[in-house]
Image: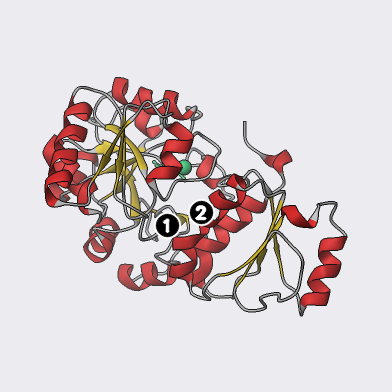
Amino acid sequence: MPTADILPTHTPALFHSAVLQAAQLLRSGRIAAIPSETVYGLAANAFSPEAVAAIYRAKGRPPGNPLIVHVATAAMARECASEWPVLAERLAGHFWPGPLTLVVPRSSRIPDIVAAGGRTVGLRWPSHAFFQSVIKECGFPLAAPSANPSDQLSPTTAEHVIAGLGERIPLIVDAGACAVGIESTVVDVTGHHPRVLRPGIISAEQIAEAAGVSVNGSGSHGEGPLRSPGQLSRHYSPKARLEVWSWQDDEALAAMLERQAFAPERIFVLAHSRVPRDLPLAQISFIPDDPEAFARALYGYLHDCDHRGAALVVIESLPPGSAWDGVRDRLQRAAAPAVQRPQ
Ligand code: AMP
Ligand code: MG
């Protein structure tokens, strides 16, 4: 049984009461799991190093991994930044509120623990009405990583948060499934060109267009102080082994599966175009051939596979194109061999 209070939000009165309770807890220096449009977040007062330390403890998060700071006005964003680059202005103007995090030089109001000791801070203005209301009620920005134990899948429903952290945190606010479903696109705007540190549903192409300059290659495998587990090769992984494959037809897939040492009743397949018809597996699922729908469904699907004891999850390779980069990145990291798992 979870020890967290779980608050629904499906009527205006419940929504309002949950905003007040979450804000009261956050003002007293505690943490709360709240919904955003990307994934559920585990929030604390971003200006309080003690409150933020509680996030790291509850998640078991390594200290070298910086947190994203969530704001609800442009003025609040500027309070967190020591300078506001022209690229930040353009991209915020275009994509905020929404699933885009801007990495800018941090102001003295942002404690070391939030920035993992670096000189920058990742800022985001979420579009989710509940998240915005809590920030406004608090009057301070909220540091929030995904609301899951470190190294497990991100939560896209309150049930996922309850399963992962229900006994470790005081409050979980339930606003149903997240609309985006994968973490925000993270873009470093401290240089002359934007640099994508973590792909997301907002693509590099869209960023280049809004910024008016080309985007520098992904920082996924870069070196230096910005490197963090969100950028490491294995992350966002289910407990089951995950493989991303292409196949011509049922026979070819069956032959590939036979080479694996897994019982068919513990194999799950997720396909978007070559959906197998006749293979005797635990489950064969169809997912729409659309990056936004795919992102929305992906973590829920992987959580479900884990819950049902999957040993092997096979996902059909994605189509090409930068619109798929966010989903492709999560699948690549989720499928990376466990030996590369960061400590
Ligand atoms: P999470 O909130 O768990 O999705 O993780 C936040 C991720 O955002 C980190 O793992 C980094 O990839 C990225 N991030 C946050 N702040 C910064 C920063 N100051 N510099 C670079 N990346 C950041
Ligand atoms: Mg996370």
SS at circle 1: loop
Residue at (54% x, 70% y) in the render: 287
Crowding around mark 1 (Cα neighbors within 10 Å: few <14, some 14 to 19, many 20+) is many
Q: Is 249 rendered above or below residue 293?
A: below
* Residue 132 x, y percent position in the rendering: 19, 48
Secondary structure beneath disc 2?
helix
Residue 248 locus on image (x, y percent) = 76, 79
Q: 204 or 179: which is nearer to us?
A: 179
**Which residue type does callout 1 highlight?**
Gly
- For the point 82% across and 69% down, the residue is 254
Q: Residue 71: x and y, percent?
A: 22, 45
Does residue 30 lie above or below 33 as drawn? above
When asked about the image quadrant of residue 114, the answer is: top left
Question: Against 223, is 89 above or below?
Answer: below
Circle 2 residue: 299
Residue situated in front as seen by the camera: 220 or 162: 162
Q: Residues within 10 Å of mark 2 (few under 14, many from 20)?
A: many
Determine the residue positioned at 79% across, 70% down. 253
Is residue 216 something that shows in the picture?
no
Q: How many circles with numbers are drawn on the protein?
A: 2
Identified by mark 2, the residue type is Tyr
Q: Which residue is mark 1?
A: 181
